[in-house]
Image: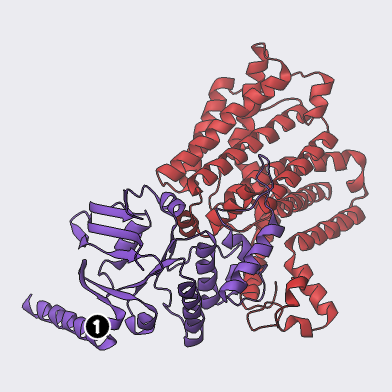
């Protein structure tokens, strides 16, 4: 911005016009307000301080590990969900893929496939489900809300059928287990890695740019020649495979996987993380880092309330309130931005 | 103005029982600016969408630089150098100016990840917009922050930058103020002076674009009813034709 300003006088359409004449503090305030990542991170820090003061066990090693594991799983799924949301769709079935992938991995491994390839085998049905979600949505033009609601039940039934409803406990060696989420640190590293990779994909690659274009202006993007259908299908696959990855990591961390694990709860938590982090449900705009921070805040909230003895019912009320307030702020900010007040 | 760029012969298009375009034959020479005029629903958009490769004609032939072609898709038409600038401009509000200008022809670093070279795109976008006389505060702002005229200018510049041989402008002055129209007309004038690009301007308000066209075609009820060089006709003659069309339409209403 700064370099361009030299060769053109401020104009009415210049978003900085007017802002420059205000005080420095005001500008810093505005930029903090603007950066959703910054405001959500501040909210997270405030919550940590609060919970540590009310429950000293909050920052204990075992609790932090617990908290990190939970947040990491949500953040990994949220990264995929953000990609789907930006391209203008939603994936409700990802929580069921979360359970299916480790089951397929378990059976592949039992059939004699070594662990690491078996993990990859688990991702195959995940990818196929992504392709199915995408094809039905794009080719048959059925809203993804309906498509993935259908596959949600379908996958759930499939996992229950192949497992007979019983949980399984894969027994990987210590190396494989520790690399693939067997402890909170490796799981956190996976979440951070996934977040960084997909944030880069979003802001620095053609795929990310076309994803934004597809969700921002579908017809316009098509007219220019963006392969919008391909972009959507691809993002469904990304989301589904990340769902499978999250389930596999959790399976190793917990030591077993239940056919009903994950499900709609983890899916809604992932979408909530995305929304709280600043991703629009209407498409065209979003951030993976924001979703990561959103997942951390939700994890801190959930864990903190549990430690403080607040019931799960109250937690849901707070979560709902948090989503509503975030949406109100988002709407307000976009109005401000439209008026040229905040950049 | 001898080299032929684009020609259609007896092109028709029906959607179910509705015939949107009947037997339309137009031609466009290199560097020529053709005004394609007509009322709403006269078939302008249909003809335009056939030329962009969006619709396939139900019958008729299309020639590009003297060779008969079949436009398979928008992508195909663009690869030939037929560049549409749609009324909705096909700009992405959430992306900044230079990314919009390079949408679908991104400059990237090598490698399978298709990492964008923002620096190169920014520099070239700035240069191109300056050259064409499109005035914007910065190429880093999001499209949503710009005025209608600035957006139109960016859309035109994007097409020209893509080495357009034929530029199809769909209602470039629709819903635009006097000043913004002047900027766009200035952009078109500069293009015309260079003479590399042939332009079809689709409009229903012919008074605005009359002076900028070399030739005028009038579309009425899906048919080309008028084809004259601008210097052989006048706004008054066109008005007379359109008034007659209105009268005929009114009488038609009374009859039924």
Say which chain is red: A
Residue occupying the point 58% across, 62% down: B100
Q: Is residue B85 visible?
A: yes
* Front-most of residues B87 and A6: A6
Residue A316 image offset from top left, x and y in percent:
68, 52
* Front-most of residues A88 and B20: B20
Quarter occupied by the N terminus of chain B: bottom left
Q: Colour of chain B?
A: purple
Q: Residue furthest front?
A: B2
Give the letter of the chain under mark 1: B
Disc 1 target residue: B238
Q: Is residue B198 left or right of residue B235?
A: right
Look at the picture and state if A147 lies above or below B157.
Answer: above
Count every numbered label the image shows and give the total. 1
Residue occupying the point 63% across, 35% down: A241
Residue occupying the point 37% across, 83% down: B211
Q: What SS does tag 1 mark?
A: helix
């Amino acid at each position: 911005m700064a370099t361009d300003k030299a060769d053109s006088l401020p104009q009415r359409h210049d978003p900085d016009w007017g802002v420059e004449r205000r005080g420095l503090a005001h500008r810093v305030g505005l930029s903090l307000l603007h950066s959703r990542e910054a405001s959500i991170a501040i909210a997270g820090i405030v919550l940590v301080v609060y919970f540590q003061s009310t429950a000293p066990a909050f920052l204990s090693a075992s609790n932090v590990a617990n908290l990190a594991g939970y947040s990491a799983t949500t953040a990994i799924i949220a990264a995929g969900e953000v990609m789907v949301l930006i391209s203008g769709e939603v994936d409700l079935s990802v929580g069921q893929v979360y359970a299916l992938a480790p089951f397929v991995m378990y059976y592949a491994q039992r059939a004699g496939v070594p662990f690491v390839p078996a993990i990859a085998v688990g991702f195959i049905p995940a990818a196929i489900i992504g392709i199915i979600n995408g094809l039905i949505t794009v080719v048959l033009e059925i809203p993804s809300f309906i498509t993935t609601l259908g596959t949600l039940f379908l996958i759930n039934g499939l996992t229950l059928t192949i497992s007979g409803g019983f949980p399984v406990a894969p027994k990987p060696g210590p190396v494989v287990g520790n690399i693939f989420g067997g402890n909170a640190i490796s799981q956190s590293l996976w979440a951070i890695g996934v977040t960084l990779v997909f944030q880069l994909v979003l802001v620095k690659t053609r795929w990310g740019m076309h994803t934004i274009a597809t969700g921002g202006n579908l017809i316009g993007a098509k007219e220019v020649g963006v392969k919008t259908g391909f972009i959507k299908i691809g993002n469904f696959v990304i989301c589904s495979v990340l769902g499978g990855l999250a389930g596999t990591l959790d399976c190793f961390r917990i030591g077993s996987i239940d056919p009903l694990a994950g499900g709609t709860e983890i899916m809604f938590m992932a979408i909530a993380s995305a929304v709280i982090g600043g991703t629009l449900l209407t498409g065209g705009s979003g951030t993976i880092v924001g979703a990561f921070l959103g997942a951390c805040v939700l994890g801190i909230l959930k864990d903190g309330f549990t430690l403080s003895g607040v019931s799960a019912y109250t937690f849901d009320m707070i979560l709902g309130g948090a989503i509503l307030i975030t949406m109100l702020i988002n709407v307000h900010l976009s109005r401000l931005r439209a008026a040229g007040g905040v950049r | 103005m001898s080299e032929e760029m684009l020609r259609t012969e007896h092109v028709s298009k029906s959607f179910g029982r509705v015939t949107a375009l009947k037997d339309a034959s137009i031609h466009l020479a290199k560097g020529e600016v053709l005004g394609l005029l007509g009322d709403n629903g006269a078939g302008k958009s249909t003809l335009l969408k056939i030329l962009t490769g969006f619709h396939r004609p139900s019958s008729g032939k299309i020639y590009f630089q003297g060779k008969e072609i079949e436009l398979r898709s928008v992508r195909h038409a663009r690869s030939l150098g037929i560049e549409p600038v749609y009324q909705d401009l096909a700009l992405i509000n959430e992306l900044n100016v230079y990314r919009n200008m390079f949408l679908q022809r991104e400059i990237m670093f090598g490698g399978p990840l298709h990492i964008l070279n923002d620096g190169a795109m920014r520099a070239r976008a700035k240069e191109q917009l300056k050259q064409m006389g499109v005035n914007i505060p910065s190429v880093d702002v999001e499209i949503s922050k710009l005025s209608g005229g600035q957006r139109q200018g960016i859309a035109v510049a994007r097409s020209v930058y893509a080495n357009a041989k034929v530029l199809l402008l769909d209602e470039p002055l629709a819903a635009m103020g006097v000043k913004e129209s002047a900027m766009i007309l200035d952009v078109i004038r500069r293009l015309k002076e260079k003479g590399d690009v042939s332009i079809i301007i689709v409009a229903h308000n012919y008074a605005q674009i009359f002076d900028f066209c070399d030739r005028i075609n009038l579309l009425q009820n899906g048919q080309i009813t008028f084809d004259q060089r601008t210097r052989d006709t006048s706004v008054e003659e066109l008005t007379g034709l359109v008034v007659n069309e209105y009268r005929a339409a009114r009488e038609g209403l009374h009859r039924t």
